Image (cartoon, rainbow, N blue to C red):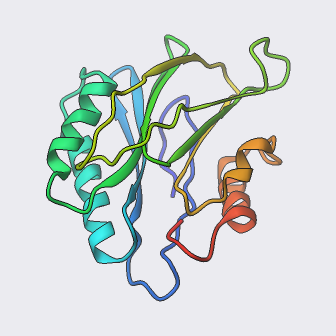
Amino acid sequence: MNHDIPGLEWAVAQRPLAGEPVSGDRYLVRPLAGGVLLAAIDGLGHGPEAARAAGLAVDCLNGIPPGRSLDVMMRECHEVLRGSRGAALTAALYQPAAGTLQWASVGNVEGVLWHRPGQPDGQRQCVTLRGGVVGYQMPSLHVSTLAVEAGDICCLASDGIASGFVEKTPAFTEPRRLADYIMERYGKTTDDA
């Protein structure tokens, strides 16, 4: 799936666990004034209850008024998901005019920012993973702000993708091809991805 958002190219690859009618892994790409909210959500387990928890998080993030900070958005999701199965969540706020990406994580949804070659701050940066479950046990959040430039690639992935993908410099810079490559090469057969 891909929608036009000025200054941003994006794509998603996803699939449910074999034999399940729905996936508990969901995503969000939401344009906001001055930026874009990105999120990957992994409802705990798989199947309809995991999909329900992930859907609650997507609905919450879609409904939060613009201008809220990332940590406030994640705490609001925590309140909405209480009583559900809960979810792992990594959310990122990309602000192109400022040249920044802010992100935070609860649970095991990985995030990596691959910088285009030649930038001084290294080849990649990873989100700080915090133990916990949105809707059940919320840790203290660690919101990081990273400098981004044209050509950088941000990837968010549930634990249905083997973490080895983080160490590899992207073979493709076109989002659709990269998403498909990561799914094909690193997608686990034991979980939603």
Task: Give how far across and how far down residue 88 sits, in percent.
Answer: 39, 50
Which image quadrant for residue 190?
A: bottom right
Task: Give how far across and how far down residue 135 sits, in percent.
Answer: 23, 49
Which residue is drawn at the image coordinates 71% and 62% (left, top)?
A: 186
Task: Give how far across and how far down residue 40 sits, in percent.
Answer: 44, 49
| Residue closer to the observer: 169 or 128 | 128
Which image quadrant for residue 7?
A: top right
Which residue is drawn at the image coordinates 24% and 49% (left, top)?
A: 136
Q: Quick check: 23 left or right of 51?
A: right
Tell me: residue 90, above or below residue 83. above
Tell me: residue 160, above or below residue 31. below
Q: Quick check: 164 left or right of 127?
A: right
Q: How many numbered discs?
A: 0
| Residue closer to the observer: 107 or 51 | 107
- Looking at the image, the residue that sits furthest to the bottom is 19
| Residue closer to the observer: 24 or 35 | 24
Which residue is drawn at the image coordinates 33% and 48% (left, top)?
A: 133
Task: Give how far across and how far down residue 159 sits, in percent.
Answer: 55, 58
Tell me: residue 126, above or below residue 178. above
Quarter of the image for the C terminus: give it: bottom right
Which residue is drawn at the image coordinates 74% and 60% (left, top)?
A: 181
Q: Quick check: 9 left or right of 109?
A: right
Q: Quick check: 127 left or right of 117?
A: left
